Image (cartoon, rainbow, N blue to C red):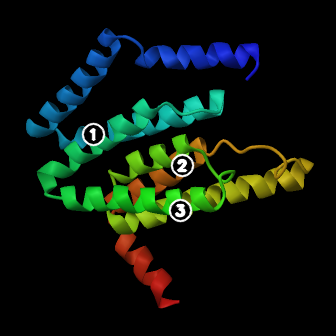
Amino acid sequence: MDTAGEARGRNWDRLWQGKKRLFLWAATVAVYGLSLWAGLAFLSPVPFLLLLGLGALEDWDTGYISDGWSLLLAMTGLLSAWPHHHVADSLLSGGLCFFIYALLYMVSRKSLGTGDILLSTGAAFWLAPVSCLLFIWLSAVSAALALGAAFLAGGQGFRRAVRFGPFIALGGVAAYGLEKMGLIPVLAAWLLAG
């Protein structure tokens, strides 16, 4: 990382340093849990979009993703699943996503970083298992399309490291939106029908 990149990295790291900031993050999660308990479930897309977006933005800016985004995504995802009795689905989605990406990481360490694995796993806690598979697929397809466009435009698409965080965010938001609109079963039936 160059000097400007190091400075940007330090700015992102400041979000997680010190007991006061960690307490603030924990209090924010607690307030979110209380809002769900109070019946304000319509607020649930806000932490998902905010945390996933900030993780993707950090990756875009620095090339790294702080583990805090992943942890907060997982905790708020579990809190969101609790009132609907979908905690088992949430845990299964997180485990499934981690397994698939960890397997890919073991096959080719250059394919993605550990921050990408953890951010994807945190986002998967918000999704049903079928939506999680669609999320992984959409993230990969959006990255492949962007790489293909970069390759066709200037030929540099395959020669440099790809910051996968923004594509994780695109796939996550798309899968979450399709799940909330009830279109995942329709899409799954269409894909399985051939």
Q: Position of residue 153 (x, y in %)?
A: 88, 50
* Total residue callouts: 3
Q: In the rendered structure, which disc, 2 or 3, sits on the residue that comes first in sequence?
A: 3
- Confirm whether residue 183 shows in the render: no
Distance between mark 1 and mark 2 Cα atoms: 18 Å
- Residue at coordinates 52% horizontally, 54% vertically from top-left? 171
The image shows residue 107 at horizontal and vertical percentages of: 63, 62
Specify the label residue 103 is tagged with. Answer: 3
How crowded is the residue under tag 2: few (<14 C-alpha within 10 Å), some, or many (20+)? many
Q: Residue furthest bottom?
A: 193
Q: Is residue 48 above or below residue 121?
A: above
Task: State the image coordinates of residue 119 (x, y, percent, origin top left).
Answer: 47, 43
Q: Which residue is mark 2?
A: 168
Q: If the image is split into quadrants, where does the N terminus sit?
A: top right
Marks 2 and 3, how far apart in space?
Answer: 17 Å
Instruction: Indicate the amino acid at tag 2.
Output: Ile
Residue 98 location in percent, x, y? Answer: 43, 56
Name the residue tied to disc 1. Answer: 76
Query: In front of the other: label 2 or label 3?
Result: 3
**Label located before the other in sequence (1 or 3):** 1
Crowding around mark 3 (Cα neighbors within 10 Å: few <14, some 14 to 19, many 20+) is: few
- Lower sequence index among marks 1 and 2: 1
| Residue at x-position 47% and y-position 89% | 193
Mark 3: amino acid = Leu
Whether 57 is drawn above or below 98: the answer is above
Residue extending farthest front? 106
Which residue occupies 33% across, 51% down?
125
Q: Amino acid at mark 1?
A: Thr
- Quarter where residue 149 is shown: bottom right
Residue 92 is tagged as: none
Which residue is at 71% across, 58% downward? 145
